Amino acid sequence: MSDLAIAARQVKYEQKAFWRNPAAAVFTFAFPLLFLFVFASLNSGGKLDNRGGISFVTFFVPGIVAFGVISACYTNIAMRMAIGRDLRILKRIRGTPVPSWAYLAGQIGSSIVTTLELVTIVITAGVLVYDVDFRWDTVGGLVATLALGAACFCALGLAISGLCPNGDAAPAIVNFSIFPLIFVSGIFFPIDDAPSWLTSLAKLFPIQHLADGLQYAFDPRTAAPGVNGGDLAVLGAWTVIGAILALRLFKWENER
Amino acid sequence: MPAIHVRGLRKSYGAHEAVRGIDLDVEEGEVFGLLGPNGAGKTTTVEILEGYRQRSAGEVSVLGHDPAHAERDLKEQIGVVLQETGVERYLTVAEVVDLYRGYYRKSRPVDELLALTGLEGQRDQRVKTLSGGQRRRLDLALALAGDPQLLFLDEPTTGFDPSARRGAWDVIKGLRELGKTVLLTTHYMDEAQVLADRVAVMVGGVIVAEGPPDDLARGDAATEIHLTLPSGAGADTLPDLPAAARITVEGESVLVTVADPTQAVNILTGWALGRGLSLPDLTVTRPRLEDVYLELTKEATPGE
């Protein structure tokens, strides 16, 4: 079997295991959908005047998509790796001939499959329930942002897992590392009126650019193909940073 | 060329030297037992051979490879059962075995692996529902997935109930019949005596004895004859025994230690029959590996 086929099999079995673990499946899918319904209901019929009067849900659905990418890639992979290290699954893997890259590619691949499922559900719910206008002419921008966003947050997820001393500490460390940035990055509500130091700070990190790139593709004022080069450049840079950090920080075994 | 060849192996963690210069040769097709108390350096040694740890000094060859280089070719040929390792809990036994088979270029079929380890009945059960013993057998099935020539088993039956242990022993005996080389660590002496062709006893980071378990058990230790004095017969009425025999009397209890028990037993039973006495609890005990082991580990760790 080629190494690529090994990675593909890993994806298949990771997905099987994911869907049989109620906690992982429910949390990854329920949270974004819950946020979608709560925030969209609170702001139903709302318009964003400083964004050319687009409806709140047109802004909010891509924000939730960004949140979904972060949970399915960053949070999910970081937790899985921290727990896998605790249970010494990773140590066992190291004893087999499987190349590290093929095993980790399987993990990333599985997160990407989960992301695609989640994104499809969120966008479908937005279109069917909240009448969001899905633009086929900007699909290019949507897909490019999603692809780079997924790569970026998988790499960062692998990196942060290396900073978790054990699986018990992982939920706290992973959530604390991401939630403050999520709130200041314009995912749940626009930060157009926030103090400029806060928006400048948020712009240094990838979350704001993931959300912005997706919102750009959904915005009715955007011209086809809806690719926001600036956002993609920052996401690309963070993908490289994430990959370097992952190579330095990722661990197969807990410290003794 | 032995399957495992070790000369002058050392491993330090900071100031602590866990392995202090050991030599080891494990021949192809041999079941080799590495014995020793906790903290003796067994797991460190085995993890160096498996490629998990880097040695501080010495020469190591495993199937002709240096495990420190973590070569894929070597990992294709070895199987590893570590202490306490997990697997994906939400997959079934057959799925996990199939997943691990896929990591190797050449592998055994799932059904064969399950039959070898007696897990056919758990085929479609999820891993998280397995008992401790079944999980340990799954560890073995996964280690065998790539049809390895050489298997490392680190305390494969720790925590088992007696019947599960016998089941595991049968599996390991089956590996010998398949011609596998096995390096087994254990602190159960009966396990080593039943399974291993040769054993090495490790204490405080060094090997203090090595050889076939029966030879080690023979050593200088003598056979013991136990009996309780029948009522009416005092210790002073005991017959003369061969000069080599040592007699210890404690109250009614008599212990005779002698290299060859044949003559002594004959004299003792002749004495009892001649006086119309019976010796209902007469026992003759061969020295066991455990006694030798306790002796060795006591000598080598005077501080404990």
Image: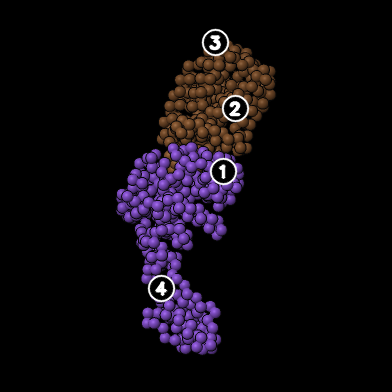
Amino acid on which the number 4 mark rests in the picture: Ala
Q: Which residue position holds label 2?
A: A118
Identify the mark at residue A223; answer none if there is no mark.
Answer: 3
Looking at the picture, do discs 1 and 3 lie on one chain?
A: no
Name the residue nearer the viewer: A244 or A17: A17
Looking at the picture, do discs 3 and 2 lie on one chain?
A: yes
Left of A181 or right of it: where is B286?
A: left
Residue A247 vertical placement versus B177 (above, below): above
Chain letter of the residue beneath label 1 in the structure image: B
Chain letter of the residue beneath label 2 in the structure image: A
Q: Which residue position holds label 4?
A: B222
Instruction: Identify the residue at horizontal 44%, vertical 32% (top origin).
Output: A2
Residue at mark 1 to residue at mark 2: CA–CA distance: 29 Å
Chain letter of the residue beneath label 4 in the structure image: B
Name the residue nearer the viewer: A36 or A133: A133
Q: Position of residue B119 (x, y in %)?
A: 56, 48
Instruction: Identify the residue at horizontal 45%, vertical 58% (top origin).
Output: B195
Earlier in the chain: of badge 4 and badge 1, it is 1
Chain B: drawing colour: purple
Chain A: drawing colour: brown
Q: Which residue position holds label 1?
A: B93
Amino acid on which the number 3 mark rests in the picture: Ala
Q: Find out whether the residues at labels 1 and 2 contact each other: C-beta distance under 8 Å.
A: no
